[in-house]
Image (cartoon, rainbow, N blue to C red):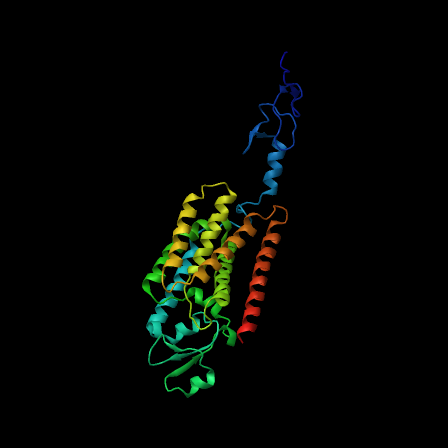
Amino acid sequence: MSTPQPVAYGCYRHPDRPTYIRCQRCGRPICGDCMIPAAVGFQCPECVAAGARQTRQNEGSYGGTRSANPAATTITLIAMNAVIWVAILLTGGSGSRLGDQLALLPSGRCNSLGQPGSYYPNATPSVCAMLTDGSWQPGVAQGAAWQLLTSAFAHVEPLHIGFNMLALWFLGPGLERALGRGRFLAVYLLAALAGSTAVLWWSDPQSKTLGASGAIFGLLGALLVIAYKVHGDVRNILVWLGINIAFTFMGNGISWQGHIGGLIGGALAAAIIVYAPRKDRSRTQWLGLAGVLAVLVVLIAVRIAQLV
């Protein structure tokens, strides 16, 4: 049995030139002079021109404008953390009133002025007022809602801020390059808020939590989502993530709630960005991120109602 031979067609621009190649985009026959290499196969001049018109100059892979300096946002975040850390150290370190105001405290507690870092469990404001060294500190349930975000910028221990900022420096610029400045910042802040929401729900209501670790775990989750989307090698990311999660549950005084909540929040925000359809992509992305924020706000409101 003879093998059927492919049929040659005339180029759509040069009908007298037979060709076996078709444009990968429109399917029209194209000769050697009309072939323009594409990511897969060849395209005709009209399709290449149409694609160029549809692609905005300097547009990022997932929408938005490419950052001229992808490290700028990371440097700004590191600077903010450093300035707040110095301010807390200058005002008393672990006993700093500023640190108490910025750290996340789900429900108010009566701090001991005589022993910084200690408090009287379950003491009410009226009982605290009668104590000679008692100082009442309001929490999120008492109106200190700013702590849900400020806690992600507050540190006391040098190693704590050192490791967090080192991780931010390694993760931040690459993610901003991939996502764009606005989307990167949205992932970071939503991860921080998701971590605080998890602390609000699952930690001791009178425990104090602070640090950028939840946001850092969110960046790790975002990196994992992007690597999976582009069919990259995710093994190194999974190993790094696994080590950090293991350390989270093995170490003392580490908020696993903040880490896991931040990881989920960052991964979800990144997934909304990178898997948004091309048609009306920006609108879909920002509505999706707004939806995540709305869910977090509802969870926070419900938990506050339980703690009041």
Confirm whether residue 84 shows in the render: yes
Q: Quadrant of the N terminus?
A: top right
Q: How many marks?
A: 0
Question: In the image, residue 56 lies at what x, y percent?
Answer: 57, 45
Q: Is residue 270 above or below residue 4?
A: below
Q: What residue is at 50 percent from the left and 48 percent from the top?
A: 225
Q: Is residue 85 above or below residue 10?
A: below
Relative image position of residue 132 (x, y in whole percent): 37, 87
Residue 160 in which image quadrant: bottom left
As drawn, 15 above or below 181: above
Q: Is residue 52 left or right of residue 133?
A: right
Q: Residue at x 43, y 47 (%)?
A: 238
The residue depicted at 57 percent of the width and 69 percent of the height is 302
Front position in the image: 138 or 207: 207
> Is 287 left, or right, of 155 in this rendering?
right
Is residue 64 visible in this depiction of the protein?
Answer: no
| Residue 215 x/y as whole percent | 45, 59
Q: In the picture, which quadrant includes the C terminus? A: bottom right
Which one is nearer the viewer's eye here, 239 or 75?
A: 239
At horizontal 43% and vertical 55% (from top left) the residue drawn is 72
Q: Residue 207 in the image: state x and y as whole percent.
A: 43, 71
Tell me: residue 204, above or below residue 159: below
